[in-house]
């Protein structure tokens, strides 16, 4: 099970996030994840997704159901396509999309982004770094991400940010 501590985002409280992946063949898996908001000592998000990876296309897709802190059930559809810019695969461009709906399939949130990703292995001894610079197209918002081994920080041009520590 993958577990992380998360801070920032919509609620500025500390959340404990857990995710488990169950393989369903070579390119498919079932993923369950959720989080507990420590400020209210209760679950704030639960989700179950079927995810597929298509290596010949460098693409991923996911479809599932989610339940949020507003006690609303909804559906999730996500996709990602990667284009490698270097032969070693360390620099690439990602195109990502996310669609969240309510129970009646009314769209609640849409996200679409393009990002440049650069992975640097052994930046320092036993320290891997990944840098991403992206643009969220629907909200017209630039962002960046710095990931160092277990730490990830995301920052957006409008001043929003979030921090994650993988346990």
Image: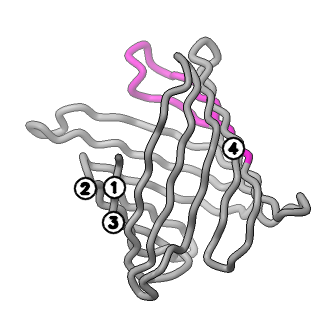
| Residue, far bottom | 40
Kindly identify which numbered label has been placed on residue 167. Answer: 2
Q: Which residue occupies 89% across, 58% down? A: 105
Q: Which of the two labelled residues, at mark 4 and mark 3, occupies the earlier sequence position?
A: 3
Q: Which residue occupies 24% across, 31% down? A: 121
- 31 or 167, nearer to the observer: 31
Residue 155 position within the rendered picture, expressed as x and y whole percent measured from the top left:
46, 65
For the C terminus, the image quarter is bottom left
- 23 or 106, nearer to the observer: 23
Is 13 placed above or below 84 here? below
The reply, left or right, for residue 49 in relation to residue 26 is right
Magenta stretch: give its range. 77-94
Q: Which of the two labelled residues, at mark 2 and mark 4, occupies the earlier sequence position?
A: 4
Residue 87 position within the rendered picture, expressed as x and y whole percent measured from the top left:
43, 13
Magenta region, mostly helix, strand or loop? strand
Q: Secondary structure at mark 1?
A: strand
Q: Nearer the viewer, mark 4 or mark 1?
A: 1
Q: Secondary structure at mark 4?
A: strand
Disc 1 to disc 2, how far (Cα)?
6 Å
Q: Which residue is mark 3?
A: 5
Q: Which of the two labelled residues, at mark 3 and mark 2, occupies the earlier sequence position?
A: 3
Disc 2 to disc 4, how far (Cα)?
25 Å
Q: Dot 3, how many residues are within 10 Å of its Cα: few (below 14), some (14-19), or many (20+)?
A: some
The reply, left or right, for residue 116 in relation to residue 95 is left
Q: Which residue is mark 4?
A: 78
Q: Which of the two labelled residues, at mark 4 and mark 1, occupies the earlier sequence position?
A: 1
Q: Which residue is mark 1?
A: 3
């Amino acid at each position: 099970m993958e577990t992380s501590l998360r801070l920032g985002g919509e609620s500025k409280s500390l959340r404990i996030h857990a995710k488990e992946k169950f393989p369903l063949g070579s390119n498919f898996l079932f993923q369950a994840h959720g989080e507990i908001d420590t400020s209210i000592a209760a679950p704030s998000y639960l989700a179950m997704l079927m995810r597929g990876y298509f290596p010949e296309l460098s693409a991923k897709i996911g479809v599932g159901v989610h339940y949020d802190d507003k006690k609303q059930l909804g559906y999730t559809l996500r996709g990602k396509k990667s284009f490698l810019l270097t032969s070693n695969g360390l620099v690439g461009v990602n195109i990502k999309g996310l669609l969240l709906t309510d129970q009646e399939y009314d769209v609640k949130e849409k996200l679409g982004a393009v990002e440049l990703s650069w992975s640097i292995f052994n930046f320092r001894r036993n320290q891997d770094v990944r840098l991403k610079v992206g643009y969220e197209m629907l909200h017209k918002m630039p962002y960046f991400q710095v990931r160092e081994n277990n730490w990830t920080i995301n920052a957006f041009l409008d001043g929003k940010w979030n921090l994650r520590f993988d346990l």
